[in-house]
Image (spheres, rainbow, N blue to C red):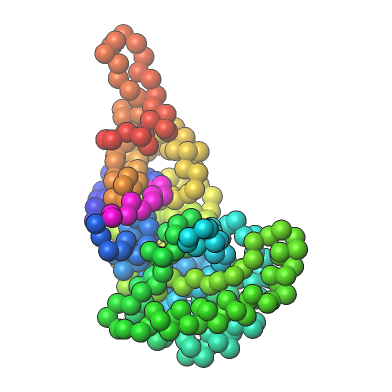
Amino acid sequence: MNSITNTTSVRRFTLMIAGEDTPDPQTERPPSGLPQERFLLGDRAPIAPILLLGQSDLVIDPQLSIACLQPVHLHATRDHLVLLNQNQLGLTEEESAALLKPILPLLEEDFKSPLLFQNASFYFIPAGPFTSLITHSLDQSHGRNIDWWMPRDSDEEGVAKNWRKLQNEIQMLWHIDPVNEKREQSAQASINSIWISGIGKLADVEAPKCFQEIQSIYSDKPLLIGLAKFLKIPHSADLNQNKLDAGFAYADNPEPIWEILSTALETKQLDEVILIDFPDGDVRERTFTRKALHQQSWMFWRKPKKRSWQDLVRANV
């Protein structure tokens, strides 16, 4: 994994943009977690405890293995099931709590632990007997045929089968739940299944070396908020333009942030901007200085043209 080194004399900001998997048909299964999730947390990608930390004030045992459960909709096509993006569901806090009520005894019996935390999108519980499951995050799996992304056994056989049994029991309960009756009457997608992912513990987090130099994290994403809290780095949803040095940002729409950062380069508020992206699922780190903001023309008498955000994202170097 690449790392970014910093010195006290260089004023630097790091901007990360999301990537997608490019599954290799020659491999049996894709890795657990999206490229940015593995970059931030390490190859074990213990997403669940970091997400929990980012959405609660709980004190979490770093050695406790935690699972993330999410109510979802599986859309039936002619020959397979597709997992819908949870953002498409519009599930409310009240609906999520109502759906949890009938399945909670099943969860706590099979996981052999009480639930830790819940909100509209997530239920968190100690992984217990499901700790060894190999899973894929909802962000990684949605919009795809779930056959390739279903939980599977690692070194302990039968765990995936036990999960499917529990999943089927939950699906039957939710099939007749009043919440789904109301949703269907209002033409909303039913909540017809539950997804498990992110199993891991805080002790497994392997943050990238660049975070040794980061002094501020800017993001509204629970994953980044949780990582900031874990690393004890100050965090905010909004970018502080007066405190860019040694900052790190990750946002769904990075272009406005880039405009601020490129201006900071031009005004010499910053010396460098590190742009991290994931073409073809691989980590790519590029350094941009004030000089690199402009495209040089062979017509040397013309004023260099400032590169657009689209130019930078598409560029191979």
Q: Residue at x 69, y 76 (%)?
A: 177
On the rendered image, what quadrant is the N terminus found in? bottom left
Query: Where residue 136 appears, x then y in whole percent?
Result: 40, 66
Q: Give the quadrant of residue 67.
A: bottom left
Q: Residue at x 46, y 79 (%)?
A: 164
Query: Where residue 125 appears, x then y in whole percent?
Result: 49, 80
- Give the total number of marks visible in the rendering: 0
**Is residue 201 in view from this perspective?**
no
Query: Where residue 70 appears, x then y in whole percent?
Result: 53, 70
Q: Give the quadrant of residue 103.
A: bottom right
Task: Using the image, determine if residue 219 lies above or below residue 198.
Answer: above
Membership of 181 in magenta stretch: no
Farthest front residue in view: 78
Query: Where residue 160 appears, x then y in whole percent?
Result: 39, 79
Q: Residue at x 38, y 51 (%)?
A: 20
Region rendered in magenta = 16-25
Task: Using the image, determine if residue 316 lies above or below residue 151.
Answer: above
